[in-house]
Amino acid sequence: MLLGSYYYITGNDILDKQHFIEHCHCLIKTDPLCRLIQIRSKHFSHKEYAYIVQSIMAFAPLYHTQVLVNSDMITNSLYGADGIHFSSEGLKKADKWQGNGRLKAASCHGINELLLAEKKKMDFVTLSPILPTPSHPEAKELGWDKTEKLLAQTSLAVYLLGGMKKEDLPKALKMGAKGISGISGFWKMS
């Protein structure tokens, strides 16, 4: 499993599904760092979501980009995606999902979820929020010091999420993270 230093998570700011697909194609095609992406956009219907994922899977492999679906948006199919990303709530039920060798990821917000993700054998996780973030303004951020302590307590590949900018990558790597992740800060860059 080859994981890059950046994990892109799509936002909810594009409402038209065709425009959304074109935006993803442009991002994947033009940004050499976009090699791991989660199609998170929960504002689409399940039918639209399936169409979007299948459309993105038609071109993502050409650019060596792995695509994950959000566990809240699937029924019993990954729509051809490379893996699944479980919400922190979905992580509790993750053992019911048979991955058949596909990537498994989860959202974590503290030590209990990190330990559960290890137990459930996730391939990687996001840890959030590290800093204040526009996508979750009500969430209390962990901060760099607490994040470093949490990273020292897990063997998982961890992407830091929440208020991250690409300039934060060296700091994240130095403290033991696999990389950084973003919604607002990454999604609107293309």
Image (tube, rainbow, N blue to C red):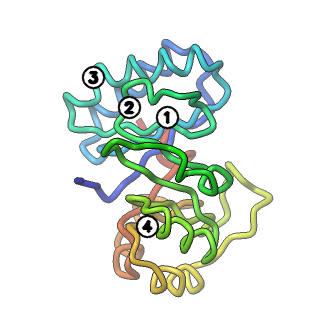
Vertical position of residue 36 compared to residue 175: above or below: above
Q: Amino acid at mark 4?
A: Val
Label 4, label 1: how far apart the Cα atoms are: 18 Å
Q: Amino acid at mark 2?
A: Ala
Q: Tell me which residue sits at (40%, 64%) in the image.
A: 167
Residue at mark 1 = 39
Label 1, label 3: how far apart the Cα atoms are: 14 Å
- Camera-side mark, 2 or 4: 2
Q: Amino acid at mark 1?
A: Ile
> In the figure, is residue 64 to the left or right of 185?
left
Residue at mark 2 = 81
Give the numbered dot on residue 158: 4
Tell whether label 1 touches label 2 (CB within 8 Å).
Answer: yes
- Nearest to N terminus: mark 2 or mark 4: 2
> In the figure, is residue 6 to the left or right of 19?
left
Q: Residues within 10 Å of mark 3 (few under 14, many from 20)?
A: some
Residue at mark 3 = 59
Q: Secondary structure at mark 4?
A: strand
- Nearest to N terminus: mark 3 or mark 2: 3
Residue 2 placed where, x, y %?
A: 23, 53
Seen from the viewer's position, the closer of residues 109 and 13 is 109
Residue 105 placed where, x, y %?
A: 46, 53
Tell whether label 4 touches label 3 (CB within 8 Å).
Answer: no
Q: Residues within 10 Å of mark 1 (few under 14, many from 20)?
A: many
